[in-house]
């Protein structure tokens, strides 16, 4: 799934969130951690595709927060959650 446009990023994150609904409580905990990583990873890749655009990331987090009805700090947390994995993929792939 392409995450180059905001619309495709938003749709992809919506799919990730929907996949975590209606699960047992034990499975839900594992899925929540996976959601954090997947959403953070999607944001990270989207930001890389728009690297060099002044203040794009700040605006992106605000817009996602509004459109997904999530706290902006939670979206930043998701990006930070995925960051160590991005570093690992950079060195070992």
Image (cartoon, rainbow, N blue to C red):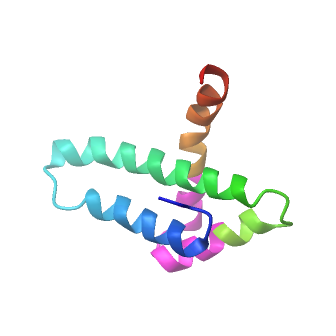
Left or right: residue 36 versus residue 66 is: left
* Nearer to us in this view, 5 or 39: 5
Quadrant hosting residue 73: bottom right
- The magenta region covers 61-77
Q: Residue furthest top?
A: 92
Does the magenta portion include 70?
A: yes
Q: Where's residue 15, x and y in %? A: 35, 64
- Magenta segment's dominant SS is helix
Q: Is residue 89 above or below residue 82?
A: above
**Of 92 and 25, which appears nearest the observer?**
92
- From the top left corner, tell me how far across and down residue 27 is, in percent: 19, 43
Res. 63 image quadrant = bottom right
Q: How many numbered discs, if any? A: 0
Residue drawn at 51 percent across, 79 percent down: 67
Q: Residue at x 56, y 61 (%)?
A: 3
Which residue sits furthest front? 2
Q: What residue lies at 17% left-to-right and 42% top-to-bottom? A: 26
Residue at image point 34% right, 49% down:
32
Query: Against 62, is 77 above or below?
Result: above
Is residue 41 highlighted in magenta?
A: no
Quarter-wise, where is residue 49 in the image?
bottom right
């Amino acid at each position: 799934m392409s995450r180059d446009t905001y619309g495709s990023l938003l749709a992809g994150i919506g799919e990730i969130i929907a996949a975590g609904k209606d699960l047992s409580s034990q499975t839900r905990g594992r899925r929540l951690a996976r959601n954090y990583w997947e959403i953070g990873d999607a944001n990270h890749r989207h930001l890389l595709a728009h690297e060099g655009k002044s203040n794009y990331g700040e605006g992106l987090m605000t817009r996602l927060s509004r459109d997904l009805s999530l706290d902006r700090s939670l979206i930043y947390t998701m990006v930070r959650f995925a960051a160590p994995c991005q570093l690992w993929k950079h060195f070992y792939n």
